[in-house]
Image: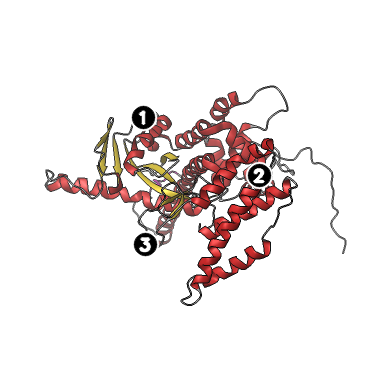
Amino acid sequence: MKSESQSNQLQFLAPSLREMCNPKNPLWQLAEKIDWKEIEAELSPLYTDIGRPAKPIRLMVGLNLLKHMFNLGDETVVKAWVENPYYQYFTGETVFQWKFPVAPSDMVYFRKRIGEKGLERILAATIKVHGESAKEEEVIIDTTVQEKNITHPTDVKLYSRIIEHCWRIADKESIKLRQRYSRVRKKYLYLQRFRKSKVRFREAIRAEKKLKVIAGRLSRELMRRLPKRVFATYAEKFDIFFQIIHQKQSDREKIYSVHEPDVHCISKGKEHKKYEFGCKVSLAVTKNSGVCVGAMSFEKNPYDGHTLPAALEQCERLTEQRPKVALVDLGYRGSPRVGETEVLCAGRLSKDLTGSARYRMKKKLGRRASIEPRIGHLKARFRLGRNFLKGLYGDMANVILAASAMNLVNWMSRLFARWFSGLGQVVQFTIQLLDQVILGSTYAAPKFQGSF
């Protein structure tokens, strides 16, 4: 049997991506729905005509949205883009490509280039996709914790990380330390396994103190031996080292990670997770349609009621209208009104309400809980559960892109639901018509009511 001939010749008459892809695919229809020209017009002033030509704005914005829509990383979304024609059509390609569109690091530079205002413009574009359903006068606002990608902080881990950083600095600057303490560190880390033992717990406590002494000793030795010009580049890092070494349990502004010093310990009253290490995030969704019209992160751990003015201002910037009513939980109590917005706190009904008015208000406040599953979806499906982006800017970028991705996925899900609804009406119409033909009924033929 002869094998099929394989030709490597280019097909000049090959169809374009628009013709290859299925027009009924939700991602194809989403690419047609988004106003890419508006996004390019708003972000193009951030580029200049000098130097190497930049990558297309639609390509960079599309890759960042696809990353969060399908829970991928910077490296994996670039690999998936080469294999998926719908991804390529979504990012503006006309012909199927075989090479990587960008380096994964280019996505990091793009996020830093556009800044917070550029990311908010992307979120505003995803809100406009929903049309009039996103322009509601009542919104639901709640806060959650965006955890950082760090290990659970303990003093022993922090001291060990300081020692490792000192080794790296010494190797990079070609400084031979008086003693590296590599074997001793390994021994003291091993003794931590007896920390909960009733017999040998004192050994673990003594080992922790020894690690603290070693971390301080190596840090001070490097400070003495590094040249002044070189030390200036590491000054901020050494400040973090000494703050960790000298901090106590009762201190307020403690550091929980060497490479992420801006992480805060936040308690939200969860029974299964008493403390979370990251930053506080505020989310705002419309009451009925569930469109995310606001997403922002905060540098420290502010009181929920103090985050409300900033969250409402962001909603006004993105939707071009001020919400008249904000539904919140008891964490926001103490703020009955913020500007022109009335704040309704769930769980607290006015004593003046009676009868049907009390019932309607109770039903409205009960709707506030609808934001909780959306927060769960953001964490489980759209990369809000663990933030891998660095620094305070990474906190802000991750939450805004996660909210943008959720808006787009919700639009595609509703499109899919409408498609199946129309298909169900076609099936029902066909069954009724067959009943008439088989049974010979004399009543009028059914009229198709769907929009399929």
| First in sequence: mark 2 vs mark 1 | 2
The mark found on residue 271 in the picture is: 3
The mark found on residue 321 in the picture is: 1
Amino acid at the residue labelled 2? Arg
The mark found on residue 224 in the picture is: 2
Q: Along the line of sight, which residue is nearer the eye, 265 or 90?
A: 265
Residue 179's x, y, as percent? 69, 57
Of marks 2 and 3, the one in the foreground: 2
Kindly state the secondary structure of the residue where label 2 is placed: helix
Q: Which residues are magenta?
A: 446-451
Q: Residue at x 24, y 38 (%)?
A: 336
The mark found on residue 174 in the picture is: none
Main structural element of the magenta stretch: helix, strand or loop? loop
> How many C-alpha atoms fall within 10 Å of the one at disc 2: few (<14), some, or many (≥20)?
few
* Quadrant in which the N terminus is drawn: bottom right
**Is residue 167 among the parts visible in the rendering?**
yes
> How many C-alpha atoms fall within 10 Å of the one at disc 1: few (<14), some, or many (≥20)?
some
Q: Residue at x 40, y 45 (%)?
A: 301
Tally of numbered discs: 3
